[in-house]
Image (spheres, helix red, strand yellow):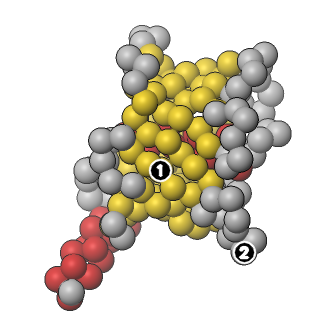
């Protein structure tokens, strides 16, 4: 029991020290057609383009690398009781499902159900972009606006053992569901 707690504490402190953590900056444009924006690395280099598709029945976000190759797609699932979005890989295979709990009067509860991996839990203040993504109590990623002063800009720090495309796509899905009118 104590070994597990010690290992969890050490893994979670890696985010504070920056050991093996990759940092991304999500900066949405204040005015854009279709929610297009870039995901940058910590040096400000464009790594991925998020292409929000307009005039569709369901919300769709295509994530492309610098060369324009599709990395993942995030799209809503219309006509569902619970708000949810699917994440597909470049080949169109479902990788994960991001779901919001039906009831949550005090705070939001979110889950990321991966097809080939354990379920991830999302904890924190989703609306203010201050939350963590955890797997079995171990921090996988941290999302925060505290590192930036710009409006509609937040950081995503992803640990070494996480699938970066899935975590970034999940952050996009959570943002789209938490801020549907933005």
Mark 1 vs 2, N-terminal side:
2
- What is the tally of numbered marks visible in this picture? 2
Question: Height in image: 76 above or below 148?
Answer: above
Structural crowding at the residue carrying mark 2, measured as other residues with C-alpha within 10 Å and reported as few (<14), some (14–19) or many (≥20): few
Question: Which mark is drawn over residue 146?
Answer: none
Residue name at image x 74 percent, y 18 percent? 56
Judged left or right of residue 98, residue 140 is left
Q: Quadrant of the C terminus?
A: top right
Report x, y in % for residue 26.
57, 39
Residue under label 1:
112
Question: Height in image: 78 above or below 18?
Answer: above
Residue name at image x 42 percent, y 13 percent? 69
Report x, y in % for residue 20.
26, 53
Q: Residue furthest left?
A: 3
Residue name at image x 43 percent, y 30 percent? 94
Report x, y in % for residue 171.
54, 45
Question: Height in image: 102 above or below 53?
Answer: below
Report x, y in % for residue 2.
20, 88
Residue under label 2:
106
For the residues labelled 1 and 2, the Cα–Cα distance comes to 20 Å
């Amino acid at each position: 029991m104590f070994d597990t707690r010690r290992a969890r504490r050490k893994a979670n402190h890696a985010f504070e020290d920056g050991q093996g953590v990759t940092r991304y900056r999500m900066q949405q444009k204040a005015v854009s057609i279709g929610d297009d924006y870039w995901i940058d690395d910590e040096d400000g280099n464009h790594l991925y383009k998020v292409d929000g598709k307009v005039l569709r029945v369901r919300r769709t976000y295509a994530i492309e690398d610098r060369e324009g190759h599709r990395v993942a797609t995030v799209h809503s699932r219309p006509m569902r009781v619970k708000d949810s979005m699917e994440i597909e890989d470049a080949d169109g295979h479902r990788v994960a499902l991001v779901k919001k709990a039906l009831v949550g009067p005090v705070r939001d509860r979110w889950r990321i159900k991966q097809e080939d991996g354990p379920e991830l839990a999302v904890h924190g203040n989703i609306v203010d972009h201050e939350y963590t993504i955890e797997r079995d109590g171990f921090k996988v990623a941290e999302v925060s606006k505290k590192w930036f002063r710009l409006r509609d800009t937040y950081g995503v720090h992803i640990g070494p053992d996480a699938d970066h495309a899935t975590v970034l796509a999940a952050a996009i899905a959570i943002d789209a569901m938490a801020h549907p009118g933005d």
